[in-house]
Image: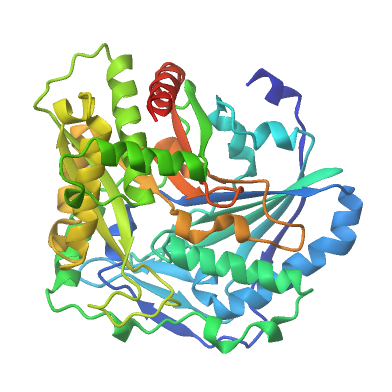
């Protein structure tokens, strides 16, 4: 972190951006059972780095006005991000409320640091990304005990004659990855067209119909009770979480298309029956990462594990366009099934750990075909138990979101990062800048990163 002490960060502007006046009526959006689990989630933090070889003055005079105008026009269509989350005392349900004039915090910063150093793939201190992440304003409590929370903030950082970073912090309660990606690409599209929102055809407009979410199992009341039980004992907001990060580093790894195919072939060759394993890119990639994370954890801890201990892998599945639901691809909100894969430590640590993990993940994906909501009543209570076990690895993001197609008119990003994995037990997964590949990022201790690198390289040599 020593070199960061020499870096200058200068705030150029702090303002509020709202939808065009009068463009959105006062609107209340109830939360569905898909939203409830994310009331307890860390804030999401996305960073997009772009080449921009111009001065700060050039950016401020030519690009910033279009960026702000296009954001305002985008918020007209994606107004929940400008709204507030209201959490009244039990037994009342949380909900999202937009009123005319609601806005998001928008900050412009100039930085003298080396963008390519910050946005590199190499291992570096996790705190290097923190200055580029905006901070949502703190929540407040109204006179009737209702907690009011903002849902999105944006920070634009200019690196003179080098680049631009678009940083976003948002609440998962408002949107999942698919909905957030829809928002970002819409903003980028309108910005790229110089603020012309007329190109935004109806078929791409977000859908907010909560009546499309059916709840025959009564999941809302179950998950709402879990939320009330937790919120009654929650601590007040403490702001950014930096404790425990002094020894953490983050690194990005890329698997090319050819490497992924070799990984699939290797797993297939080690299966007694190829019909018993689903060799999707998602399954084999996550299996490889899961095994390397667990092995590196155990290596750092001195390999004192119990073979019968259970290891958990957590991922989510998008329920849009699934046959059992009538939810369109443009639905804005949360529409995710929470999935947990379980394996014994001995299976993960064994010679065929990647094969065992691929089978387990593939089987869980197959189970979704017979009902994505099986076990949904335990999404919150079950997760608490799993998280406390200490042997859980989660994945954020998805290659299907195509984050490298988010073009504001400066070309595709040179790098996209999920900053919030710093405080989560997992990794993020995305498409890579090179067509057909997969990119993933991990944030772990220095010692564990060294071990992870060794296990990852060893696995690739076997292919």
- The answer to whether residue 158 is visible is no
Foreground residue among 381 and 177: 177
Question: Which image quadrant for residue 14?
Answer: bottom right
The residue at the point 27 percent across, 34 percent down is 354
Question: Which image quadrant for residue 148?
Answer: bottom left
The image quadrant where one finds the N terminus is: top right
Is 403 on the left-hand or right-hand side of 161?
left
Foreground residue among 355 and 413: 355
The residue at the point 52 percent across, 80 percent down is 99
The residue at the point 11 percent across, 23 percent down is 307
Q: Position of residue 167 (x, y in %)?
A: 62, 51
Looking at the picture, does residue 123 appear above or below residue 85? above
Q: Position of residue 326 (x, y in %)?
A: 30, 83
Looking at the picture, does residue 61 appear above or below residue 360? below
Looking at the picture, does residue 175 appear above or below residue 345? below
Is 461 on the left-hand or right-hand side of 56?
left
Is 56 on the left-hand or right-hand side of 235?
right
The image quadrant where one finds the C terminus is: top left
Q: Position of residue 139 (x, y in %)?
A: 45, 57
Foreground residue among 67 and 455: 455
The residue at the point 13 percent across, 74 percent down is 218
């Amino acid at each position: 972190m020593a070199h960061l002490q020499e870096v200058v960060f200068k705030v150029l502007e702090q303002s509020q951006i709202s939808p065009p006046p009068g463009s959105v009526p006062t609107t209340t959006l109830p939360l569905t059972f898909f939203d409830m689990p994310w009331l307890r989630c860390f804030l999401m933090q996305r960073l997009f780095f772009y080449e921009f070889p111009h001065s700060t003055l050039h950016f401020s005079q030519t690009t910033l006005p279009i960026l702000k105008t296009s954001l305002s026009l985008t918020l007209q269509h994606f107004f929940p991000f400008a709204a507030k989350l209201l959490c009244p005392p039990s037994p009342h349900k949380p909900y999202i409320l937009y009123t005319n004039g609601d806005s998001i915090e928008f900050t412009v910063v100039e930085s003298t640091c080396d963008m390519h150093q910050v946005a590199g793939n190499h291992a570096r201190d996790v705190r290097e990304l923190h200055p580029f992440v905006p901070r949502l304003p703190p929540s407040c409590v109204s006179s009737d005990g209702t907690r009011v929370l903002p849902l999105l903030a944006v920070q634009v950082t200019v690196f003179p004659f080098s680049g631009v970073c678009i940083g976003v912090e948002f609440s998962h309660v408002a949107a999942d990855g698919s909905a957030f990606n829809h928002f970002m690409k819409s903003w980028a599209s309108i910005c790229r067209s110089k603020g012309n929102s007329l190109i935004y055809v109806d078929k791409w407009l977000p859908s907010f119909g909560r009546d499309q979410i059916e709840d025959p199992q009564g999941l809302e009341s179950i998950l709402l009770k879990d939320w009330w039980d937790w919120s009654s004992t929650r601590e007040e907001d403490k702001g950014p979480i930096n404790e425990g990060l002094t020894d953490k580093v983050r690194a990005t790894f890329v698997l090319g298309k050819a490497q992924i195919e070799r990984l699939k072939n290797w797993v297939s060759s080690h299966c007694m029956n190829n019909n018993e394993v689903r060799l999707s890119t998602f399954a084999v990639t996550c299996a490889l990462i899961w095994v390397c994370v667990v092995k590196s954890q155990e290596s750092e801890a001195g390999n004192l594990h119990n073979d019968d201990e259970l290891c958990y892998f957590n991922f989510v599945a998008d329920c849009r366009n699934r046959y059992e639901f009538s939810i369109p691809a443009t639905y804005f909100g949360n529409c995710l099934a929470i999935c947990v894969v379980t394996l014994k430590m001995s299976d993960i640590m064994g010679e065929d750990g990647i094969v065992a993990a691929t089978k387990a993940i593939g089987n869980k994906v197959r189970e979704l075909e017979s009902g994505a909501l099986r076990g949904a009543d335990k999404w919150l209570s079950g997760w608490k138990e799993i998280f406390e076990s200490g042997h859980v690895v989660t994945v954020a993001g998805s290659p299907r979101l195509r984050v490298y197609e988010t073009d504001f008119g400066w070309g595709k990003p040179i790098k996209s990062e999920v900053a919030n994995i710093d405080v989560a037990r997992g990794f993020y997964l995305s498409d890579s800048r090179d067509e057909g590949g997969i990119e993933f990022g991990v944030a772990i201790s220095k010692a564990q990163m060294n071990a992870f690198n060794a296990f990852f390289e060893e696995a690739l040599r076997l292919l």
